[in-house]
Image (spheres, rainbow, N blue to C red):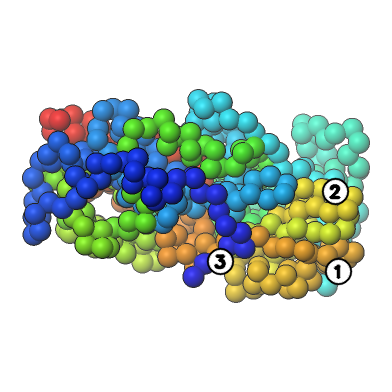
Amino acid sequence: MPRATRGNTGTGASRRGFLKAVGGAAGLAALPSGVVNAPAPSQREPDVIVIGGGFAGVTAARDLSHAGLRTLLLEARSRLGGRTLTVRSEEGPLDLGGTWVHWTQPNVWAEITRYGLAIAETPGAIPGRTLWWRDGAAHESGWLDTGPLIAAAFCATEPAPEAPLRLLTTLAAMNETMNRFHADAAAALPRPFDPFFGGSWRDADTISVREKIDALGLSDDRRIVLEGMLATSCHAPLANASFAEMLRWWALSGRNLERYNDAVARFKLRDGTVSLLEAIRADGDFEVRLSTPVSRVEQGPDGVLVTTSDGERIGARALIAALPLNLLGEIDFSPPLSAEKLDAARERHAGSGVKAYLRLRGETPNFAAFSDEREAFSLLFTSHEGADSGTLIAFGTSASKIDVHDRAAVESQVRRFLPDVEVTESIAYDWHLDPWSKGTWCMFRPGQMTKYLAALREPEGRVHLAGGDFALGWRGFIDGAIESATSVAQRVIADLDERGR
Ligand SMILES: Cc1cc2nc3c(=O)[nH]c(=O)nc-3n(C[C@H](O)[C@H](O)[C@H](O)COP(=O)(O)OP(=O)(O)OC[C@H]3O[C@@H](n4cnc5c(N)ncnc54)[C@H](O)[C@@H]3O)c2cc1C
């Protein structure tokens, strides 16, 4: 079973409290057994069932309820939030899953604005020192071959006046390398929120990030820093991630290193992602049943019939499955989902790396340290700096390279860069072992976007998929989950209107 070294705050809704709150849940239970072509639901039955209570499911349920549809959300875990999970620490909330948000992510930003939530920053996204690991030793700027210094270009980011020159030099070199790696982004995705508009992204989808890096013929120093950055973004071995995915992230960030960095690692919800999730949930008028995995979905001409793992059967007029791609095959759909959907689920997306917060005793500077994808951690950077203690965030491409719960193993990695610190605690969640996620954020393998994206987005009668893994824009992000949920909920509302409410 997955481990988190801390309990989670969840949404604060205990199952008991929830059952008390929903009251009418018993009335939802059980259409007559054996009913496949579910009849139009009675007054007490939901119009729509949403399976999955991550950001997509909760957003869809809110929007359906705003349209006056009776909505029941069934969630397998004992908490909402899915691949986001906020835990409390002495330094404040820590997000063990989805964390960073940005105004270039319009769907999540609109929600943050709507609910007036506060933002905080992760200092290590703008590090005071940048290091990397090469040939068994840590290196710091000055070693990085900057070639023709493109500081002028990068100066657009206006480093703080006190930023040391070595930082500018490293970032300038990184900027140049990132621009080279992503040079095809504009042609590949001229409208990054609409891949079907055109562009050459299908060419990029035939190769992996690994192949593209190798083709650049970079010096070791440049390759390592680039690899550290990209391995962190892919959260997977680089041979498993499509080059098109990285072009998408770059295109969505305005093809600019500063915005890319800001979008994926700098700004977070001050009170944790749970604060946004709770705001969305509180704004909706829908029922939630926790610890209720769905095992079967039957669809007939008039409705759907859902069977939970404890055998309860619930009918509705439409269904939104707001599930991770990697879990689509685990629910028995009748009629089955399309072959493309099932093939994609069988192949799984590649996102399966590690993320951990490492609490340190000893001076913790504001720094970032990159390693190539063979190392346990591709990136370490500062979450909280301090003269006597602090916290780092560690990312790596695979749990097979390090047990993030092994304090000593983690400490030896950190001491590569900060030889005098002790790791006192490692706080992490095993998303790849969790049966309700089976992976981390969605990172398509080479060829998957070409083969599956359109098919995954196709509704099947009254069954609709929603989720961060099926989004057009920031797929693999909270923004993608909200984008997908918003549009799918509108489609379901229109569909039920057409069929006559
Ligand atoms: C370590 C990590 C770091 C990340 N970092 C970021 C980041 O910084 N910024 C960002 O924007 N995004 C980030 N993400 C991605 C982001 O968290 C996800 O893209 C987003 O939360 C997905 O939401 P979702 O609702 O589509 O899916 P999920 O959150 O996976 O929700 C699906 C829900 O379905 C439930 N479920 C599954 N099977 C069943 C079943 N049979 N019956 C009932 N319920 C079921 C699950 O329990 C889950 O609650 C990160 C993710 C991880 C894991």
Q: CA distance from mark 2 to mark 1?
A: 24 Å
For the point 60% across and 74% down, the residue is 400
Tag on residue 137? 1
Towards the viewer: 278 or 358: 278
Q: CA distance from mark 2 to mark 3?
A: 28 Å
Task: Return the residue at label 2.
Answer: 386
Among the two numbered marks 1 and 3 on one chain, the one whose residue lies closer to the N terminus: 3
Q: CA distance from mark 1 to mark 3?
A: 32 Å
- Check contact, mark 2 vs mark 3: CB within 8 A: no
For the point 59% across and 54% down, the residue is 96
Among the two numbered marks 2 and 1 on one chain, the one whose residue lies closer to the N terminus: 1
Q: Residues within 10 Å of mark 2 (few under 14, many from 20)?
A: some
For the point 24% across and 41% down, the residue is 24
Residue 123 higher or lower than 335, as above or below: above
Q: Residues within 10 Å of mark 1 (few under 14, many from 20)?
A: few
Q: Secondary structure at mark 2?
A: loop
- Check contact, mark 2 vs mark 1: CB within 8 A: no
Q: Is mark 2 within 8 Å of ligand 1?
A: no
Q: Amino acid at mark 1?
A: Ala
